[in-house]
Every structure is written in structure tokens, then in C-alpha cells.
Image (cartoon, helix red, strand yellow):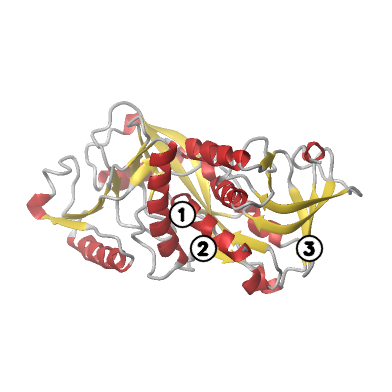
Amino acid sequence: MLSALSSEQGQVSVSTEVFEAQTVVIGAGVIGLAIARALAKSGQEVIVLEGAGRFGEGISSRNSEVIHGGIYYPERSLKAELCVEGRQQLYHYCQTHKVDHRKCGKWIVAVNEAQGSRLQDIQMAADRNGVVLSLYEGRRIAPEIPEIRASSALWSPETGIIDSHGLMLSLLGELQDAGGELVLRSPVVAAESDCQRHLLHVGGDNPLILTAQNVINAAGLGAIPLANVWAGLPGDCRPQQWFARGVYFSYSGRCPFKSLIYPIPEPGGLGVHLTLDLAGQARFGPDVEWIDHEDYTVDSNRLATFVRGIRQWWPGLEQARLQPAYAGIRPKLSGPEGGFSDFRIDGPEDHGLPGLVNLFGIESPGLTSCLAIADRVKAMLV
């Protein structure tokens, strides 16, 4: 059966071949792989369908690779709960599965008194989520981050960085060890569901129809477009989606920081911040640019805006060492004026279709939350 699923993305034709599966996960990013691993280890026969030629080529390969603390999100939101749970699980997983990571911590800096009051709000929100931050003011800051201009700062000791590709390789290995399979170049182009079964139209060189008892739509940026062509799914379970593109600039040569540096959050994101890879190389980003279609162009003209923003808190930035790197897109469930939007994990209680789970708006802190999200999905299908 699985050899017939191998196909090229974007080539769609009608198929009369029908195959059966127990559980299908659509999307082989870090979320889809984490869910598939959890379900396969629970004894289910799992197939992961991925439209691209490799796993993890979407959102999962275009982020900051940060393990977040769970600081900014409203109390009792899914982002808050799953980030805190997921962070603890992810550190343990990395330690026990030898996935490269480092708990390097991060500073959230305020450059003036007005921003300092916002730090207090952030600290209180973090405390409500069970995340302990330390406030540094005045002379206490300079010995800690002497290169940074700040009137006050919050220290988050639980923030870290991770090799996201290594994590996905580990999840995939465990999925396959448990009998699950990843099938590439197999885009799901349409679907239909009733109370008995789910029927997936798989495109490509050898299009076919696949029926399944359980289906998890973890298609990232494609999750809502797929829901829009999903027959039998109620209309109120097809949310609107906005794209927020963020670009990154790399910083060549030595960087004086061992921890991450974040400014005060901005609408749509956490502000242009400094992150590090596991080799100590620095990069800045992402910014926020609202776009109407999937586009990963990195506009080098945004450099001047980056420089102005970064120099507010790091006067020693050398502009010549900044180079365009890459862009990522956050799948948002609210637009520029919409405020906070939470994860949506829509299960049978939401849409009335047994065995179906749709994941919408899984942006940051999705990487941090991946194992906790997987547990939440598994509980919906038990």
C-alpha cells in the first residue's frame, strides 16, 4: 500500500484506488512527528503523510529554535499550559535521547522607565503561569550584561536553545521503531468525514483515496486551507488565518553574549531579539510583517530597521556584520489588530466527528510545546 502513496507534490488527479489505515497524521513537522510518535507508541498503526520531499521543511525549519519558558501567555490559555508542560518534557527528552540543546537563559530588557513598568506586567503574567523570573534594576544589571543598555531587565533561567532538526530525527526514529511510517511527496488535497470514517484524497504521481479511523490535521500553514475543503466539517470549525512573516539576519564573527537577549514584546511577536545557535553564532529576528500569501523573501532593505531597533539596547552592534539569513511565517488566528490568539486543537467534542483532530494556529511556542500537544491529541483519541 505505502509504495502507492509515494507521489509528487502539486500533481492532482482523480483516483479510484481506495486503501485503509488506522491512524493518519497529515504533516511531518515537529508537531506532526511528535503526535505520530505518541500514537504509535500507544499501539496505533500510524502513517504520516507529507507533501514535501523531506520532513520538517515548513514552520519547523524556519524558527528561532528556542525552548521558551512560558512567560508571555494569558493564564489558563493553551499556549501557557502547553508551553510550561512541554518545556519540562522537552528538556527531559533531550537529556534522555541525546538531542543537542542548552539551557542558556534569556534577558528581557527595558531601555527606559516606561518599558520598565511593562517588565513588571510580564513578571506577574509569568508568575501566574508558574514561571519564576528575576528582576534586575539599576546597578545590578551592568555586571550581568555589560554590553547592553537597559534600565531594568528580567532573567529567565529556563529558556534554552535546541537542535530542532535533531529533535525531529529522534521523533521520526521512535515513530519508525514503533511501526509507524513516514510517506513523502503525498499531499492531501481534499478530505471528507462522517460519523463512520474519514476519507482522504491523496494527490501526486499515484493519487489514491485513503480511509482512516483517526486523522490528525497537523499541516501547519496548510491546516486551515485543508479544513476549508474538508466535506462534513462544520463551518464554524474552519477558522480564518493570517500570515505574519518574520525575517532573520545572521551576525558574522564573535558575539559577546552567552544568553538570549529579548526586547519588550511587540504586536504579533516578541520583538527583534538576539538568539544563538548551539555553536554560539548569533542571529537577530524575527520582525513582524503581515502578508497575504506564503512568501519567504528576505528583504535586505529591512536591515536599517533592524539596526535602529537593536541599537536601542545594544549600542555596540556592528552593522557590517549583519547579513540576510532566512524568513519564517507564523500562522495566526487573528490579524494585526486582533490581539492574542491561542492554539486551537479541535477534537471530536468541538466538531462532532469521532477520530478527527485539527490543529490550527500552532505558532510559537509550538516547538517547545510539541510533546505536550502530542499528549493532548492522544487523550482526545483514546
- Amino acid at circle 3: Arg
Residue 338 pos. (x, y %): 49, 68
- For the residue pair 240 and 324, the one nearer the viewer reads as 240
Residue at the front extreme of this rendering: 43
- Point out the frontmost of discs 3 and 1: 3
Mark with earlier residue (3, 1): 3
Residue at the (7%, 51%) spot, across then down: 139
Residue 311 in the figure: left or right of residue 53: left
How packed is label 2: few (under 14 Cα within 10 Å), some, or many (20 or more)?
A: many
How packed is label 3: few (under 14 Cα within 10 Å), some, or many (20 or more)?
A: some
Q: Pointer 2 and pointer 1: residues touching (CB < 8 Å)?
A: yes
Disc 3: which residue: 197
- Amino acid at circle 2: Phe
Secondary structure under badge 1? helix
- For the residue pair 359 and 290, the one nearer the viewer reads as 359
Question: Residues under labels 2 and 3: Cα distance?
Answer: 26 Å
Q: Is residue 138 visible?
A: yes
Disc 1: which residue: 369
Q: Is residue 293 visible?
A: no
